[in-house]
Image (tube, rainbow, N blue to C red):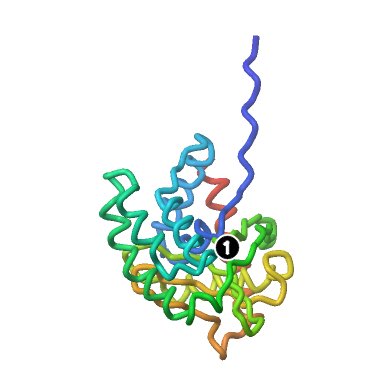
């Protein structure tokens, strides 16, 4: 009896995966996409930042100015404690940069699915922030030890802007470099049409590499 053919894995990327991909060059792109494909096939992957994000959201929602962030370091598993200790100072600095805790509220964001040509990319901000003056921000967090490159900032903010009607209507996208407490906004001189063409080319190459890695 012939074994059934396995269902082919269709190309797919999260916002994090795709922006990390565009930040790579040459052969490292292929290696990276191959790794994403294997991870998808095995349904593996673990997010060590989950409790950290919950604590940060709690500080915004309850106007506590960083007490949840400070406390989470003591309750997280010991293996993740050094990571959290490295993240808390920058996250707290960014939290304070928002102004008086009572003037900022947590806003609900929704995930969206972007299509870059034939490549689906999941747009998933971590949360939203609503200011007392009515301004809203959809926030994506960058946890890496190295700062986000100009390319990854542009790609992240452009794709979030592209689907903001679904994510958090009328909000501005923000990429927060957590370790350095720095918020990145879309550059005033950004050219959306050029960014769109660049990302379409990157997406086409991603799909080709994904198929080759099968």
Q: 138 left or right of 24?
A: right
> Where residue 109 sits in the image (x, y, percent)?
64, 62
> Where residue 163 sits in the image (x, y, percent)?
69, 68
> Where residue 111 sits in the image (x, y, percent)?
65, 57
> Where residue 36 sits in the image (x, y, percent)?
48, 47
- The structure residue drawn at horizontal position 55% and vertical position 75%, both measured from the top left corner, is 104
What residue is pinned by disc 1?
125
How crowded pointer 1 is (Cα within 10 Å; few <14, some 14-19, many 20+) is rated as many
Q: 110 left or right of 56?
A: right
Q: Nearer the viewer, residue 43 or 179?
A: 179
Query: Against 208, is 56 above or below?
Result: below
Q: Nearer the viewer, residue 4 or 181?
A: 181
- The structure residue drawn at horizontal position 62% and vertical position 28%, both measured from the top left corner, is 6
Dividing the picture into quarters, in which one does residue 170 lie?
A: bottom right
Q: Nearer the viewer, residue 151 or 71?
A: 71
- The structure residue drawn at horizontal position 61% and vertical position 39%, both measured from the top left corner, is 9
Query: Against 81, is 87 above or below?
Result: below
Quarter containing the C terminus:
top right
Quarter containing the N terminus:
top right
Q: 127 left or right of 47?
A: right
How many numbered discs?
1
Q: Secondary structure at mark 1?
A: loop
Dividing the picture into quarters, in which one does residue 169 lie?
A: bottom right
- The structure residue drawn at horizontal position 57% and vertical position 62%, both measured from the top left corner, is 125
């Amino acid at each position: 009896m012939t074994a059934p053919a396995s269902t082919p894995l269709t190309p797919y990327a999260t916002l994090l995966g795709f922006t990390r991909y565009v930040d790579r060059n040459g052969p490292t792109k292929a290696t990276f996409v191959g790794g994403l494909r294997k991870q998808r096939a095995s349904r593996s992957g673990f997010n060590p930042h989950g409790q950290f994000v919950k604590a940060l959201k709690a500080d915004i929602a309850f106007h506590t100015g960083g007490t949840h962030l400070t406390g989470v370091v003591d309750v997280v598993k010991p293996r993740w404690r050094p990571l959290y200790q490295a993240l808390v100072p920058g996250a707290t600095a960014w939290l304070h940069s928002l102004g008086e805790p009572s003037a900022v509220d947590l806003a609900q964001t929704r995930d969206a699915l972007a299509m870059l040509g034939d490549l689906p990319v999941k747009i998933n901000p971590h949360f939203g922030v609503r200011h007392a003056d009515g301004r809203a921000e959809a926030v994506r967090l960058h946890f890496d030890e190295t700062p986000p490159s100009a390319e990854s900032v542009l790609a992240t903010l452009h794709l979030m802007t592209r689907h903001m009607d679904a994510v958090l209507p009328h909000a501005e996208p923000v990429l927060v470099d957590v370790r350095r407490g720095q918020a990145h906004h879309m550059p005033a001189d950004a050219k959306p049409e050029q960014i769109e063409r660049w990302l379409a080319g990157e997406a086409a190459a991603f799909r080709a590499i994904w198929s080759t890695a099968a």
